[in-house]
């Protein structure tokens, strides 16, 4: 009995307690990396490999299009976005963005500084529609008379499995049955049947 209770509380804790998932995306020069916890993935190398294997058979493409047709169409995409915006049980998110950049012209560098600030404000506002944005920090460091771009985005998503399951169920249900109305068959009573 004690073992069952322990297992029950462990499962309950996994479902209800938020699990922090740390993801870092960095770009420097021509190299892009993504790091999940301490595991680093070289995006640049993977993209080069995919480009080399880009010669896919036409039949495979047709099959893939048929399989993913319902999920990729714009109507379903809009529906999913609307559901995520209206969802009350949003996942929590913390984000930090560091941008180091420089343009050849000092005037362009100064103009880009203001533009980047506006862009980051828009990003924060957009994220708050889909996540419970707990913290959003940004730092922009311009350098003049050079030409480069380095940036790093660190995000911590607090994944609650119960919320994830709920969101998935809501999305799947609405995609499958959202546009369909339940048809109730008409039943004739004995008197109606006799009169008819």
Image (cartoon, helix red, strand yellow):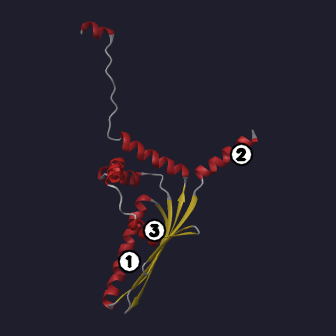
Pick the front one: 138 or 67: 67
Q: Is residue 61 above or below residue 153?
A: above
What residue is drawn where x is 46% and y is 71%? Answer: 45
Q: Residue furthest right?
A: 2
The percent coordinates of residue 165 (x first, y second) are 50, 48
- Nearest to viewer (mark 2 / mark 1): 2
Q: Residues within 10 Å of mark 1 (few under 14, many from 20)?
A: some
Q: Is residue 91 left or right of residue 75?
A: right
How far apart, in angstroms, are the residues tagged by discs 3 and 2? 43 Å
On the image, which quarter does residue 131 sit in?
A: bottom left
- Nearest to viewer (mark 1 / mark 3): 3
Q: Can residue 51 be seen?
A: yes
How far apart, in angstroms, are the residues tagged by discs 1 and 3? 31 Å
Q: Is residue 6 above or below residue 111?
A: above
- The quadrant the N terminus occupies is top right
The percent coordinates of residue 27 (x first, y second) are 45, 76
Judged from the image, the secondary structure of the residue bearing numbered disc 3 is helix
Judged from the image, the secondary structure of the residue bearing numbered disc 1 is helix
Residue at image mark 3? 46
Residue at image mark 1? 117
Residue at image mark 2? 6
The percent coordinates of residue 124 (x first, y second) are 41, 68
């Amino acid at each position: 009995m004690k073992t069952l209770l322990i297992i029950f509380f462990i499962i309950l804790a996994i479902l209800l307690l938020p699990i922090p998932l740390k993801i870092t995306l960095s770009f420097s020069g021509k190299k892009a990396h993504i790091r999940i916890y301490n595991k680093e993935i070289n995006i640049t190398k993977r993209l080069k490999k995919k480009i080399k294997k880009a010669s896919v058979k036409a039949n495979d493409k047709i099959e893939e299009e048929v399989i993913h047709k319902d999920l990729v169409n714009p109507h379903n995409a809009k529906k999913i976005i609307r559901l995520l915006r209206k969802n009350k049980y949003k996942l929590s998110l913390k984000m930090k963005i560091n941008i180091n950049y420089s343009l050849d012209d000092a005037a362009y560098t100064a103009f880009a500084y203001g533009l980047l600030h506006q862009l980051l404000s828009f990003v924060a506002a957009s994220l708050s529609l889909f996540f419970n944005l707990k913290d959003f920090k940004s730092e922009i460091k311009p350098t003049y008379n050079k030409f480069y771009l380095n940036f790093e985005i660190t995000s911590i998503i607090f994944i609650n499995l119960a919320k994830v399951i709920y969101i998935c169920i809501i999305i799947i249900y609405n995609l499958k049955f959202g546009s369909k109305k339940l048809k109730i068959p008409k039943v004739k009573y004995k008197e109606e049947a006799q009169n008819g």
